[in-house]
Image (cartoon, rainbow, N blue to C red):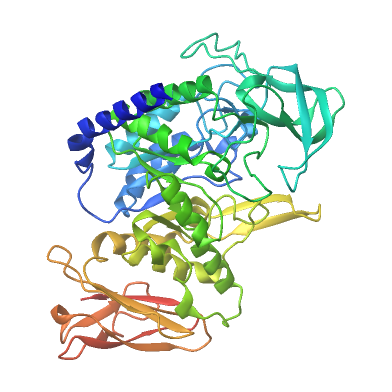
């Protein structure tokens, strides 16, 4: 315990020493917009790292300031692996492992070039960090374990058994490059397969110090175990290795921050200490957003507190509000869009989103937002002053893919590209969405808000939307600086000659088409 206290004091001192450097802004003080630059069904032929290099300047030109890129290291599925079945964190597409040198997205050199090209365009890079588990071991070893119930991981049954667990990770092709660490069964808490009997169930390992991690989600009794070989975040060698990896990765890649995967399955104290260690090492802000996927707002607030507000969180409840609103045939109470969300209750730590790779159709958290509603939802997250908005790759570029549904049948999904609309909204966020916000979430169908602008961004804007089948109108305050001024709808829903003009008190009767959104900007 004394060593841990000394380390904590050292870490605090290191962070204080970095305070001046970390407080300096990286880019000009304009509204930031991040983009999740992948979806579940990108193929190897997309050559995503090369696409980042080609597109970085175009994305910067429309207001993107940061890209969240998919996991860059070797997964057990080779070039088919999205990146979440982690095999070797140190192989960024450099070694012949899991049947390939490159990852699904390209080679190490292409990845590093993509980051450099993004930085040249003024775009930051957030790396996807997956530390919960490992998959694709090189060999098995005999481990004493006990079966636990899938629905209650605290319920053991059947007595102790010896299983052949896939827990040997030697990385022979990498041959100790970057790290000599070898993973063995005692670096894990459990697994879900016995190679001897071919039994699929959750096995919790027996041994000194072996138990499920604490301060994880309480779902299923204890939600430490998710998949594969579950990493033991209480093992001191594991903690040290993962921190060393984070420092190595930050030094090599020069990324600007992280998206941390599956934190509901990881001790909150570990995640906090890990990111603080990397920040202290780099003396950089390293903006970090964690994926704790729950629609329970209280749980999200508890996690923020448990992790001492070292990370932001994705606003899953807001996404669910958008999904429900888009599938309610105009019967959703639009005035409640922000109810029960981080965007409303703790906007400084909210990363707002419309959809992501897990919520898109046919995925594990399937809850897609209908295409007709996406312009409304994106207007809501991009043009309001709460939260840090994230745009989804498949909503921007569109996507077509085929996969099996829960019924085992094949389905082909066509996701519409909203690039034209998103370009308009992102530029509006960059150029106009500043200053005082006047909010009018006061109607079940027609809602809106205005931004009065500031000295540098003086035009301001007014946003009005409706989920119903009639044209919507609402009197809204544009502001004292916008008295007797006329506004044009930049979405193109109304012709340029069809303006809304304010009165001598700065109020205007703004309008929008049925089931649509209009963004009015001062001429």
Q: Residue at x 46, y 21 (%)?
A: 240
**Image quadrant of residue 456?**
bottom left
Q: Residue at x 59, y 36 (%)?
A: 213
Image quadrant in which the N terminus is located: top left
Q: Residue at x 71, y 42 (%)?
A: 154
Q: Residue at x 63, y 44 (%)?
A: 223
x, y (%) of residue 304?
43, 50
* 382 with respect to 210 (left or right): left
Image quadrant in which the C terminus is located: bottom left
Q: Is residue 462 visible?
A: no
Q: Residue furthest top?
A: 175
Q: Is residue 152 visible?
A: yes
User: Compared with residue 41, is residue 336 higher up or lower down, i.e. above or below?
Assistant: below
x, y (%) of residue 226?
65, 40
x, y (%) of residue 114?
39, 33
User: Compared with residue 206, is residue 522 higher up or lower down, i.e. above or below?
Assistant: below
Tally of numbered tags: 0
């Amino acid at each position: 315990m004394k060593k841990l206290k000394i380390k904590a004091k050292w870490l605090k001192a290191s962070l204080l020493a970095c305070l001046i450097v970390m407080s300096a802004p990286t880019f000009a003080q304009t509204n930031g917009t991040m983009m999740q630059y992948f979806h579940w069904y990108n193929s190897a032929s997309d050559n995503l790292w090369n696409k980042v290099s080609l597109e970085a300047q175009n994305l910067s030109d429309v207001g993107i300031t940061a890209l969240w890129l998919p996991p860059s290291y070797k997964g057990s599925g080779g070039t088919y692996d999205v990146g979440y079945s982690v095999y070797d964190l140190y192989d960024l597409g450099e070694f012949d492992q899991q049947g390939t040198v490159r990852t699904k997205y390209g080679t190490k050199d292409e990845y590093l070039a993509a980051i450099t090209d993004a930085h040249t365009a003024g775009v930051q890079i957030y790396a996807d960090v997956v530390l919960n588990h490992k998959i694709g071991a090189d060999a098995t070893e005999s481990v004493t374990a006990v079966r636990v119930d899938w629905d209650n991981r605290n319920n053991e049954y059947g007595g102790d058994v010896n299983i052949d667990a896939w827990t040997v990770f030697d990385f022979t092709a990498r041959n100790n490059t970057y790290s000599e660490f070898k993973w063995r069964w005692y670096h894990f808490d459990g697994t879900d397969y016995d190679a001897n009997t071919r039994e699929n169930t959750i096995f919790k390992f027996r041994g000194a110090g072996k138990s499920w991690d604490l301060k994880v989600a309480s779902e299923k009794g204890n939600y430490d175990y998710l998949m594969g070989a579950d990493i033991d975040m209480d093992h001191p060698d594991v903690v040290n290795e993962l921190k060393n990896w984070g420092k190595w990765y930050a030094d090599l890649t020069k990324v600007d921050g992280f998206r941390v995967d599956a934190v509901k399955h990881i001790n909150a104290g570990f995640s906090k200490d890990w990111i603080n260690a990397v920040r202290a090492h780099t003396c950089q802000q390293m903006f970090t957003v964690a994926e704790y996927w729950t629609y329970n707002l209280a749980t999200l607030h508890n996690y923020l507190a448990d992790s001492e507000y070292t990370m932001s969180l994705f606003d899953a409840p807001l996404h669910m509000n958008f999904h429900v609103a888009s599938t309610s045939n105009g019967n959703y109470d639009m005035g409640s869009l922000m109810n029960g969300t981080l965007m409303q209750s703790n906007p400084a730590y909210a990363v707002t989103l419309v959809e992501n790779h897990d919520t898109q159709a046919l995925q594990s958290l399937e809850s897609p937002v209908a295409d007709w509603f996406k312009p409304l939802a994106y207007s809501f997250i991009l043009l309001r002053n709460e939260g840090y908005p994230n745009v989804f790759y498949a909503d921007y570029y569109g996507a077509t893919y085929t996969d099996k549904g829960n019924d085992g049948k094949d389905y082909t999904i066509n996701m519409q590209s909203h690039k034209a609309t998103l370009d308009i909204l992102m530029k509006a966020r960059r150029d106009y969405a500043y200053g005082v916000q006047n909010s009018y979430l006061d109607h079940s169908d027609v809602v809106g808000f205005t931004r009065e602008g500031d000295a540098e961004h003086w035009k301001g804007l007014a946003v009005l939307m409706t989920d119903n089948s009639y044209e919507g109108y609402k009197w809204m305050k544009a502001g004292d600086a916008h008295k007797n001024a006329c506004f044009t709808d930049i979405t193109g829903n109304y012709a340029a000659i069809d303006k809304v003009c304010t009165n001598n008190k700065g109020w205007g009767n703004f309008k929008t088409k049925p089931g649509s959104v209009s963004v009015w900007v001062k001429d």
